[in-house]
Image (cartoon, rainbow, N blue to C red):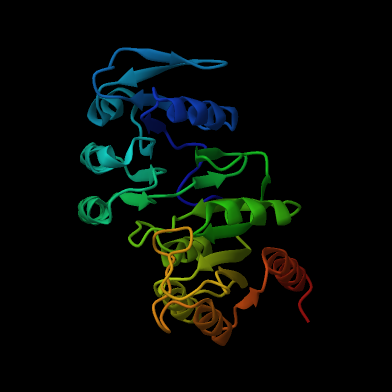
Amino acid sequence: MAIFLTEHSKVIVQGMTGAEGQKHTSRMLAAGTNIVGGVTPGKGGQSVDFAKRSIPVHGSCADAVKSTGADVSVVFVPPRFVKGAVIEAVDAGLGLVVVITEGVPVHDTAAFFAHAEANGTRIIGPNSPGLISPGRANAGIIPADIAGPGRIGLVSKSGTLTYQMMYELREYGFTTAIGIGGDPIIGTTHIDALRAFQDDPDTEAIVMIGEIGGDAEERAAAFIAEYVTKPVVGYVAGFTAPEGKTMGHAGAIVSGSSGTAAAKQEALEAVGVKVGKTPSETARLMRAALEQSLNPV
């Protein structure tokens, strides 16, 4: 099984007529994603031709949902339009909205996330590479040819580390890999993904990638101790980050003793999560965990 996204998901792309929207729609289609339409205000009734099919463009999410029965949206619009685009998707009844855009104002994210939560819509992102259930569907910008379907669930704050970990563990494959984004406020969290992977019968083990800043990893550690019985291995980016300097993601900033990589590693290891010092070491720890689950002592 996969979590959040399957071959049955009906996907629309907000901003499909833009350069990035068209490029990644083409890649998502090539990965087998069931893309049923695009949304660009003022361009309803048009279509965009891709290699093997023509995708209709709708003027609003409401029109797209009414015409196609879509239940997932992938958002490729400029930062200043993201709030309106996500609220429109939520109001149209879409159950999952994947926000790829980076640079979204934090107060905008807070507003549309509160609206989504009140209406039962799951948000992934913003500043996310999306999610992929290999062999089934791909919603976002994760390259579909890194790894195939398999036994591991992956949740990560970092897009590039998502790609690297998928490559490192490509021989085992993945049920779903999710890039949750590294902004100070995000929709889906480590805990949300951990819960879903724990409940998924096909996911045998979980990789969790975190980074400096905030306390999401510490909260995830507490959740793992209480709820997760499957093997979990982790990696925390940012051991050499200087205090008070944002590193890469807007949420990756250490303030005093809060949010350090060492503190996160300590919290995870205290609940039995093995934490690698590098992505490659983390992959080796996952291989060992999978072999042990197949051949318990």
Residue sitting at 36 percent across and 29 percent down?
A: 15
Q: Nearer the viewer, residue 263 or 195?
A: 263
Q: Position of residue 115 (x, y in %)?
A: 20, 51
Q: Is residue 146 above or below residue 199?
A: above
Can the viewer see residue 89?
no
Residue sitting at 37 percent across and 25 percent down?
A: 38
Residue sitting at 56 percent across and 75 percent down?
A: 229
Q: Is residue 19 above or below residue 73?
A: above
Q: Position of residue 278 (x, y in %)?
A: 68, 68
Residue sitting at 39 percent across and 63 percent down?
A: 251
Q: How many marks overall?
A: 0
Quadrant of image for the C terminus: bottom right
The answer to which image quadrant residue 117 occupies is bottom left
Q: Position of residue 14 (x, y in %)?
A: 35, 31
Q: Is residue 113 above or below residue 16?
A: below
Q: With 262 as the anchor, is 113 left or right in this view?
A: left
Q: Nearer the viewer, residue 53 or 156?
A: 156
The answer to which image quadrant residue 85 occupies is top left
Q: With 197 as the anchor, is 277 left or right in this view?
A: right
Can the viewer see residue 262?
yes
